[in-house]
Image (spheres, rainbow, N blue to C red):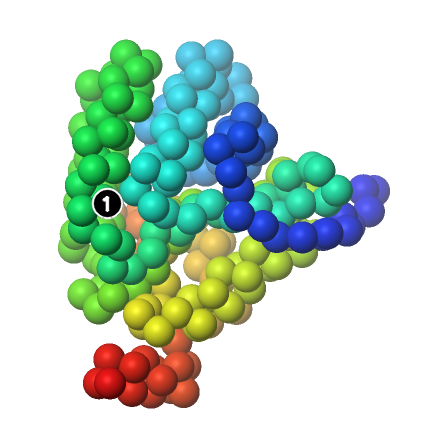
Amino acid sequence: MKASPRISMISKLSKSDKAFFVALMSKAFSRDPLFLYLFGDSELDNTARSRVKSFVSFMFDKSFLLHEEVWGCFENESLLGAYIVEKPRANQLQRIWGGLLLIGRLVPLLFRMSGRTLHLLNAYMRVTRSSSAPPSAHHYLIMIGVEPEIQGKGVGKALLNHLLNRVNADKTSLGVALDTENKENVYLYRRFGFALSRETSFDRLPVYCMFYQKNISCLEDWKININN
Protein backbone atom coordinates (compact mmCIF):
# COMPACT_ATOMS: atom_id res chain seq x y z
CA MET A 1 0.00 0.00 0.00
CA LYS A 2 1.42 3.36 -1.05
CA ALA A 3 2.00 5.78 1.82
CA SER A 4 0.31 9.16 1.87
CA PRO A 5 2.48 11.77 0.15
CA ARG A 6 4.19 14.53 2.09
CA ILE A 7 2.93 17.75 0.51
CA SER A 8 5.85 20.13 0.65
CA MET A 9 4.17 23.08 -1.04
CA ILE A 10 1.43 24.37 -3.31
CA SER A 11 2.81 26.90 -5.76
CA LYS A 12 1.90 28.60 -9.01
CA LEU A 13 3.16 26.73 -12.05
CA SER A 14 5.40 28.34 -14.65
CA LYS A 15 5.64 27.66 -18.36
CA SER A 16 8.58 25.33 -17.69
CA ASP A 17 6.20 22.99 -15.80
CA LYS A 18 4.14 22.27 -18.90
CA ALA A 19 5.44 18.73 -19.53
CA PHE A 20 4.75 17.72 -15.92
CA PHE A 21 1.26 19.24 -16.04
CA VAL A 22 0.33 17.53 -19.33
CA ALA A 23 1.57 14.13 -18.12
CA LEU A 24 -0.30 14.47 -14.81
CA MET A 25 -3.62 15.73 -16.17
CA SER A 26 -3.67 13.28 -19.07
CA LYS A 27 -3.59 10.44 -16.54
CA ALA A 28 -5.90 12.13 -14.03
CA PHE A 29 -8.63 12.64 -16.66
CA SER A 30 -8.26 9.31 -18.47
CA ARG A 31 -11.51 7.99 -16.91
CA ASP A 32 -13.34 11.32 -16.84
CA PRO A 33 -16.78 10.94 -18.48
CA LEU A 34 -16.41 14.08 -20.61
CA PHE A 35 -12.92 13.13 -21.83
CA LEU A 36 -14.06 9.60 -22.65
CA TYR A 37 -17.02 11.00 -24.57
CA LEU A 38 -15.00 13.57 -26.50
CA PHE A 39 -11.73 11.76 -27.15
CA GLY A 40 -12.26 8.04 -26.56
CA ASP A 41 -10.42 5.73 -24.17
CA SER A 42 -6.89 7.11 -23.84
CA GLU A 43 -5.79 4.06 -21.85
CA LEU A 44 -6.52 1.74 -24.77
CA ASP A 45 -6.29 3.88 -27.89
CA ASN A 46 -3.17 5.77 -29.03
CA THR A 47 -5.17 8.27 -31.07
CA ALA A 48 -7.33 9.09 -28.07
CA ARG A 49 -4.21 9.42 -25.91
CA SER A 50 -2.66 11.86 -28.38
CA ARG A 51 -5.86 13.94 -28.50
CA VAL A 52 -6.09 14.13 -24.71
CA LYS A 53 -2.47 15.29 -24.43
CA SER A 54 -2.99 17.87 -27.17
CA PHE A 55 -6.10 19.23 -25.47
CA VAL A 56 -4.48 19.39 -22.00
CA SER A 57 -1.45 21.09 -23.56
CA PHE A 58 -3.76 23.65 -25.17
CA MET A 59 -5.51 24.30 -21.85
CA PHE A 60 -2.16 24.93 -20.16
CA ASP A 61 -1.09 27.41 -22.86
CA LYS A 62 -4.50 29.09 -22.73
CA SER A 63 -4.16 29.68 -19.01
CA PHE A 64 -1.09 31.85 -19.48
CA LEU A 65 -2.41 33.74 -22.48
CA LEU A 66 -5.75 34.56 -20.82
CA HIS A 67 -4.24 35.30 -17.39
CA GLU A 68 -5.81 32.35 -15.63
CA GLU A 69 -3.94 30.72 -12.76
CA VAL A 70 -2.36 27.26 -12.65
CA TRP A 71 -1.41 25.92 -9.24
CA GLY A 72 0.29 22.65 -8.41
CA CYS A 73 0.85 20.49 -5.35
CA PHE A 74 4.39 19.15 -5.01
CA GLU A 75 6.22 16.50 -3.04
CA ASN A 76 9.86 17.50 -3.41
CA GLU A 77 10.00 18.09 -7.19
CA SER A 78 7.19 15.70 -8.16
CA LEU A 79 3.88 17.23 -9.28
CA LEU A 80 1.10 15.37 -7.45
CA GLY A 81 -1.93 17.42 -8.46
CA ALA A 82 -2.90 20.70 -10.10
CA TYR A 83 -5.78 22.99 -10.95
CA ILE A 84 -6.57 25.79 -13.41
CA VAL A 85 -8.88 28.58 -12.27
CA GLU A 86 -10.30 31.52 -14.17
CA LYS A 87 -10.23 34.72 -12.18
CA PRO A 88 -13.09 37.27 -12.17
CA ARG A 89 -12.88 40.60 -13.89
CA ALA A 90 -9.74 39.93 -15.87
CA ASN A 91 -8.43 42.93 -17.77
CA GLN A 92 -10.49 43.05 -20.98
CA LEU A 93 -7.63 44.30 -23.13
CA GLN A 94 -5.36 41.55 -21.85
CA ARG A 95 -8.01 38.95 -22.60
CA ILE A 96 -8.52 40.25 -26.14
CA TRP A 97 -4.78 40.24 -26.81
CA GLY A 98 -4.44 36.82 -25.22
CA GLY A 99 -7.30 35.55 -27.36
CA LEU A 100 -5.53 36.69 -30.51
CA LEU A 101 -2.31 34.97 -29.44
CA LEU A 102 -4.32 31.86 -28.59
CA ILE A 103 -5.24 31.40 -32.24
CA GLY A 104 -1.66 30.31 -32.89
CA ARG A 105 -2.03 27.58 -30.24
CA LEU A 106 -5.44 26.60 -31.59
CA VAL A 107 -4.27 25.80 -35.13
CA PRO A 108 -2.25 22.66 -34.16
CA LEU A 109 -5.22 21.47 -32.10
CA LEU A 110 -7.49 21.72 -35.14
CA PHE A 111 -5.33 19.19 -36.98
CA ARG A 112 -5.54 16.69 -34.10
CA MET A 113 -9.26 16.94 -33.36
CA SER A 114 -12.18 15.89 -35.50
CA GLY A 115 -14.76 18.47 -36.51
CA ARG A 116 -17.30 16.66 -34.35
CA THR A 117 -15.08 16.93 -31.26
CA LEU A 118 -14.51 20.66 -31.76
CA HIS A 119 -18.25 21.18 -32.27
CA LEU A 120 -18.98 19.30 -29.03
CA LEU A 121 -16.39 21.34 -27.11
CA ASN A 122 -18.04 24.57 -28.24
CA ALA A 123 -21.47 23.22 -27.36
CA TYR A 124 -20.24 22.19 -23.91
CA MET A 125 -18.92 25.70 -23.26
CA ARG A 126 -22.29 27.17 -24.19
CA VAL A 127 -24.12 24.83 -21.82
CA THR A 128 -21.84 25.37 -18.83
CA ARG A 129 -20.51 28.92 -19.06
CA SER A 130 -23.27 30.78 -20.88
CA SER A 131 -26.43 29.31 -19.44
CA SER A 132 -25.37 27.88 -16.08
CA ALA A 133 -22.71 30.21 -14.67
CA PRO A 134 -23.94 32.78 -12.11
CA PRO A 135 -24.06 36.40 -13.34
CA SER A 136 -22.09 37.81 -10.40
CA ALA A 137 -18.29 38.12 -10.52
CA HIS A 138 -16.79 34.78 -9.54
CA HIS A 139 -13.92 32.37 -10.05
CA TYR A 140 -14.40 29.35 -12.30
CA LEU A 141 -12.58 26.08 -11.62
CA ILE A 142 -11.67 24.93 -15.12
CA MET A 143 -10.01 21.65 -14.16
CA ILE A 144 -8.48 19.94 -11.15
CA GLY A 145 -6.67 16.62 -11.16
CA VAL A 146 -4.56 14.36 -8.97
CA GLU A 147 -2.08 11.62 -9.83
CA PRO A 148 -4.31 8.48 -10.01
CA GLU A 149 -2.06 6.37 -7.76
CA ILE A 150 -2.42 8.78 -4.84
CA GLN A 151 -6.05 9.81 -5.17
CA GLY A 152 -7.76 9.74 -1.80
CA LYS A 153 -4.53 10.63 0.01
CA GLY A 154 -5.35 14.28 0.71
CA VAL A 155 -3.84 15.98 -2.33
CA GLY A 156 -7.19 16.95 -3.86
CA LYS A 157 -8.36 18.23 -0.47
CA ALA A 158 -5.23 20.36 -0.11
CA LEU A 159 -5.73 21.84 -3.59
CA LEU A 160 -9.41 22.63 -3.01
CA ASN A 161 -8.69 24.24 0.34
CA HIS A 162 -5.96 26.31 -1.29
CA LEU A 163 -8.38 27.44 -4.00
CA LEU A 164 -11.15 28.34 -1.54
CA ASN A 165 -8.75 30.28 0.66
CA ARG A 166 -7.71 32.37 -2.33
CA VAL A 167 -11.33 32.89 -3.38
CA ASN A 168 -12.34 33.95 0.13
CA ALA A 169 -9.48 36.47 0.18
CA ASP A 170 -10.45 37.99 -3.18
CA LYS A 171 -12.73 41.01 -2.66
CA THR A 172 -13.82 40.98 -6.33
CA SER A 173 -15.26 37.46 -6.22
CA LEU A 174 -18.49 36.14 -4.74
CA GLY A 175 -17.43 32.52 -4.99
CA VAL A 176 -16.33 29.81 -7.37
CA ALA A 177 -18.28 27.80 -9.96
CA LEU A 178 -17.45 24.42 -11.46
CA ASP A 179 -18.98 21.75 -13.65
CA THR A 180 -18.59 18.01 -13.38
CA GLU A 181 -19.95 15.07 -15.34
CA ASN A 182 -19.19 12.58 -12.58
CA LYS A 183 -22.05 12.27 -10.08
CA GLU A 184 -19.68 10.97 -7.38
CA ASN A 185 -17.87 14.31 -7.50
CA VAL A 186 -21.06 16.11 -6.51
CA TYR A 187 -20.91 14.54 -3.04
CA LEU A 188 -17.21 15.33 -2.74
CA TYR A 189 -17.63 19.01 -3.62
CA ARG A 190 -20.58 19.34 -1.27
CA ARG A 191 -18.24 18.50 1.59
CA PHE A 192 -16.29 21.65 0.72
CA GLY A 193 -19.34 23.90 0.71
CA PHE A 194 -20.39 23.72 -2.94
CA ALA A 195 -24.10 23.52 -3.74
CA LEU A 196 -25.67 22.01 -6.82
CA SER A 197 -27.02 25.00 -8.74
CA ARG A 198 -28.21 23.20 -11.85
CA GLU A 199 -28.41 19.69 -13.24
CA THR A 200 -28.52 19.60 -17.02
CA SER A 201 -27.27 17.48 -19.90
CA PHE A 202 -24.88 17.83 -22.79
CA ASP A 203 -25.60 15.60 -25.77
CA ARG A 204 -27.04 12.96 -23.39
CA LEU A 205 -24.12 13.34 -20.98
CA PRO A 206 -25.25 14.57 -17.51
CA VAL A 207 -23.67 17.81 -16.29
CA TYR A 208 -23.74 18.96 -12.67
CA CYS A 209 -23.18 22.71 -12.23
CA MET A 210 -22.06 23.70 -8.74
CA PHE A 211 -21.28 26.93 -6.92
CA TYR A 212 -19.41 27.77 -3.73
CA GLN A 213 -20.70 31.03 -2.26
CA LYS A 214 -18.47 32.89 0.12
CA ASN A 215 -19.62 33.22 3.70
CA ILE A 216 -21.58 36.26 4.93
CA SER A 217 -18.57 38.02 6.44
CA CYS A 218 -16.72 37.75 3.13
CA LEU A 219 -19.75 39.12 1.29
CA GLU A 220 -20.02 42.05 3.70
CA ASP A 221 -16.32 42.84 3.20
CA TRP A 222 -16.91 42.75 -0.55
CA LYS A 223 -19.88 45.15 -0.30
CA ILE A 224 -17.86 47.57 1.81
CA ASN A 225 -15.01 47.38 -0.68
CA ILE A 226 -17.14 48.21 -3.76
CA ASN A 227 -19.08 50.93 -1.94
CA ASN A 228 -15.84 52.67 -1.01
At x 42%, y 48%, the residue is 69
Question: Where 6 falls versus 190 (above or below)?
Answer: above
Q: Quadrant of residue 40?
A: top left
Kind of residue at badge 1? Gln
Is residue 194 left or right of 4 when viewed as pictured?
left
Q: Is residue 193 left or right of residue 97?
A: right
In this rendering, would 189 be left or right of 213?
A: right
- The percent position of residue 5, horizontal first and vertical second, equals 76, 48
175, above or below 92, in the image = below
In the depicted structure, whether residue 80 falls above or below residue 159 = above
Q: Is residue 88 above or below residue 50?
A: below
Looking at the rendered image, the quarter that the N terminus falls into is top right
Q: Nearer the viewer, residue 162 or 194?
A: 162
**Which residue is located at x 72 percent, y 44 percent?**
75
Front-most of residues 112 and 9: 9
Q: Is residue 34 visible?
A: no
12 or 117: nearer the eye?
12
Name the residue rendered at 57%, 46% in the picture.
72
SS class of the residue under badge 1?
A: helix
Q: Does any portion of residue 141 appear in the rendered image?
A: yes
Relative image position of residue 223 (x, y in whole percent): 27, 84
Q: Quadrant of residue 211?
A: bottom left
* Residue under the point 64% across and 42% down: 80
Q: Quadrant of the C terminus?
A: bottom left
- Badge 1 crowding class, 10 Å Cα cut-off, few under 14, some 14 to 19, many 20 or more, is few
Which residue lies under the disc numbered 1? Answer: 94
Quarter of the image holding residue 126? top left
In this rendered view, identify the residue nearer to me: 39 or 15. 15
Counting from the top left corner in percent of width and height, residue 78 is at: 69, 37
Q: Position of residue 128 (x, y in %)?
A: 24, 50
Q: How many marks?
A: 1
